[in-house]
Amino acid sequence: MSVLFLVLALGLLMTVAYRGFSVVIGAPVCALLAVFLTLGPAAVLPVFSGLFMKAMVNFIALYLPVFLLGALFGKMMELTGAAASISAKIVSVLGEKHTIGAVVLACAILTYGGVSLFVVAFAVYPFAKALFRRSSLPERLIPGTIALGSFTFTMDALPGTPQIQNVIPTTFFGTNLYAAPILGVCGATFVLISGMLFLERRKRTLGPMDWSKRDEESEEEAPTEPDELVEGAELPKPYLSILPLITVAVVNFTASRYIAGIKERDIALSSLGVDSDAVVHLDKMGGLFAIEVALVLGLIVAAVFGYSRLKSKLQQGMNAAVAGAMLAALNTGSEYGFGAVVASLPGFAIVKDKLVGLFSNPLVNEAVSVNLLAGI
């Protein structure tokens, strides 16, 4: 029954999330429901206070700066027009013959440079739509094309990517963002090639699209000047726009190497003149420190070169970025707390024990086990 209660809690959380309710509320409710059904009512409040909240707070304490800096950097690139400028330049250079590749490349450069993948999706979409229109490609391929460039190989496969999905594991494994570079490059190459082959195959299967007919059936107005949109009218110079991305990449790599070379791996705050017994473990925090420094310097470079475009909308944009970062951190932290509670229940231990030794090959067994347990 304990496994059934586990599945019930997970299914309820998925339903709540897909219905549009906040997981900040849904995650603790579903986790405590599993505790109530498995361990009884007496365990609910102790587990909530001693396990769920502790796990959630620890997660936010570690990763809130990265969420915040990433959101601010992405918003800065958006408000200055830098993200749109880079997208427009890539699209105009590659042109109609390589429409899908141009959109994928634009998304990949932006996400690998530190721009939030959600910002990238909205920044690239207008250019992708204009280019797909000129190339008579099916509109239904746009989401998949943007997703391939933003949400796959540059999100967590390429070594050094500053996306939060690549940052989080560094504190658990004591690595930096460049861990397992050969495996990362091989995985990224496989994902990119297979994704491009799939999109090209779907393009041939669907055939050309009559956008004029689509515009007649839709209430949405067609862009009046798609050529100007793709060519980047009234956008900053691409070579200036890409400087913040280069800054993030270079500083991230340099800081990672520098921190890895520090011999003293445990830094007591008392040794720095601080009245505290806390100790910072560089093996755990080094990856976070590197990307935080890189994003701060990237923010400064973006602000310097884009100040003229930024000054009139800085306050509103920064407030929106902070609100988005806080919501993302709370959502993820709440889900992390849910996972901590679920992992402590007897049902999870039963599932984990069943998965151990499921395959004779240890690599296959680990890959399958990790994915199945992560799904729970």
Image: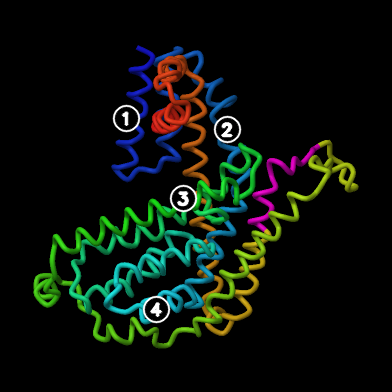
Nearer to us: label 4 or label 3: 3
What is the x, y in percent for residue 28?
A: 46, 31
| Residue type (three-letter) at the residue carrying disc 1 | Gly
Nearer to us: label 2 or label 3: 3
How far apart are labels 1 and 3 at the CA level? Answer: 34 Å
Is any part of residue 339 visible from this angle? yes
Residue placed under numbered mark 4 in the picture: 88
| Residue type (three-letter) at the residue carrying disc 2 | Ala
Q: What stretch of residues is rendered in magenta?
A: 278-292
Which residue is painted at 57% across and 46% down in the image?
A: 180
* Snapshot colouring: rainbow
How far apart are labels 1 and 2 at the CA level? Answer: 21 Å
Which residue is painted at 24% across and 73% down in the image?
A: 132
Which residue is painted at 49% across and 43% down in the image?
A: 332
Nearer to us: label 1 or label 3: 3
Dominant SS type (magenta): helix
The answer to which of marks 1 and 4 sits earlier in the sequence is 1
